[in-house]
Image (spheres, rainbow, N blue to C red):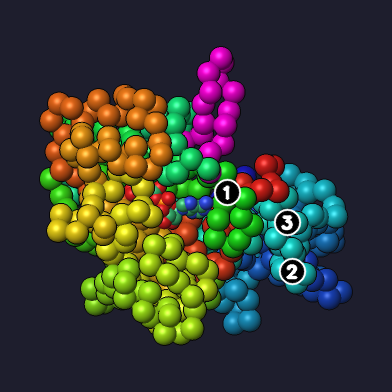
Amino acid sequence: CKRTHYSNEIGPELAGETVKVTGWVHEIRDLGGIVFVLIRDKNGITQLTAPSKKLSEEMMADVRAARKETIITLTGTVQESAKAPNGVEIIPSNIDVINVSQLPLPLDTTEKVEAEMDTRLDSRFMDLRKHDVSAIFKIKSQMLHTARNYFYDNDFTEITTPKLVASATEGGTELFPITYFEKEAFLGQSPQLYKQMMMATGLDNVFEIGQIFRAEEHDTLRHLNEALSIDAEMSFKSQTDAMNTLEELIKRILSDISTNCQKELSDLDHELDIPTEPFPIVTYEEVIDIVNSRDVEMNYGEDLNRAAEKVLGETMGSYYFITEWPTAIKPFYVMPNSDDAEKSTAFDLMYRDLELSSGAQRIHDYDLLYSQIEAKDLNPDSFEKYLQAFKYGMPPHSGWGMGADRLTMVITGAKNIRETVLFPRDRRRLTP
Ligand code: AMO
């Protein structure tokens, strides 16, 4: 059943040639004297055209035997046809049935009937047969590819760290406890402690692309219980350096997608938002003024609530940083500002009303780190192995973590984070 071409490779220039196309039967239109069968493969759709006047009875019977979503290999002659996809149709000389699909289908792959998200996720393999769904994952793949290229080009070492862990990093409430022999253990919320420990190894720049787990009970369009995070950590670098790295990475991702994913963007009917100017920076205090001026309540020392995010989304444009967060509402490892310890080196990267990334310069001084752990009512004993890395020469360092699924929402125009994850995990879903 070897194909000679994918759908998108067959155009009018091949008129008269014999080709082999393998794919799923997308749609069948039997007009009596002529039958059209659309065959779908990874890259597009090819039209089989069977005029009964020109074809044998056996051939017409084979064509009429086609069933939706059955896989066939079609051998035939290319003929120009202005009305068909890619301007060509194939007149069949042979049809091989490779694998028969059961009917009825759990989903309509032609999208004439739009399915609910849950129905789609229940039969995700079939959902991805729709080109506007697979496009999201092709773009996400390009995004991850570019991220890796960017890090390798900039002297980062790729690391992988455990997801079975003994302690919290981002505040104690959002942990999934698991049974780990006779010990208490959790699913990792973030590679935070490990990527920081790597700064004490002399590797200088590390990155990780891996899953993070958050036992958040929210049921929103932006949260999942298992998310993909792109984490970077760099030695001898300030938070400004870390912000620049993040901005450069995002701009390279946008540029690569614009170069390599035009078909996918058009399948999605999505126009990429590519900023040319540096990302604007607003301080946390300016954010409060902006939000309050729009009659939304937010006091100093509070995190952004949803209404505040919406106001920012309307006023700030696309990508922007929020800096100078109060030390009190950021995690223990965040370095306070040298001139005013109430404020910190922490930053968030936003896209309109969506938080994409958090980062900071980190505390590298053992005593300060120890006292910050205590100040957050955490037990330094449970951070013993992490703290050890700060006793024997820990460089100043900075880093960030970016939600890869959320970035995928932005670059594909998806409104629901579930669209951007093959098999999303939320409060109600653990299968498939
Ligand atoms: P934070 O907790 O802000 O920071 O997470 C970093 C980014 O990860 C994404 N994210 C999520 N995406 C989907 N669903 C979730 N439940 C979810 N939780 C987080 C967001 C968020 O901005 N250790 C720090 C990072 C650092 O300082 O290096 C951290 O985990 O896009």
**In terms of sequence position, does the residue under pointer 1 or pointer 2 come before the other?**
2
Q: Quadrant of residue 417?
A: bottom right
> Real-space Cα distance between discs 1 and 2?
30 Å
Question: Could you classify mark 2 by the number of other residues whose Cα lies within 10 Å: few (under 14), some (14-19), or many (20 or more)?
Answer: few
Specify the label residue 114 is tagged with: 2
Indicate if the residue with disc 2 has its beta carbon within 8 Å of ligand 1.
no
Q: Quadrant of residue 258?
A: bottom left
Which residue type carries mark 2?
A: Glu
Q: Position of residue 275 (x, y in %)?
A: 31, 76
Question: Could you classify mark 1 by the number of other residues whose Cα lies within 10 Å: few (under 14), some (14-19), or many (20 or more)?
Answer: some
Q: Which residue is mark 1?
A: 216
Q: Is residue 153 left or right of residue 87?
A: left
Q: Is residue 153 left or right of residue 287?
A: left
Residue at image location 66% in from the left, 68% down from the top: 47
Kindly state the secondary structure of the residue where label 2 is placed. Answer: loop
Residue at image location 35% in from the left, 30% down from the top: 380
Which residue type carries mark 3?
A: Asp
Q: Is residue 48 left or right of residue 373?
A: right
Specify the label residue 118 is tagged with: 3
Q: Nearer the viewer, residue 18 or 274?
A: 274
Quadrant (top left/top right/bottom left/bottom right) for the C terminus:
top right
Indicate if the residue with disc 1 has its beta carbon within 8 Å of ligand 1.
yes
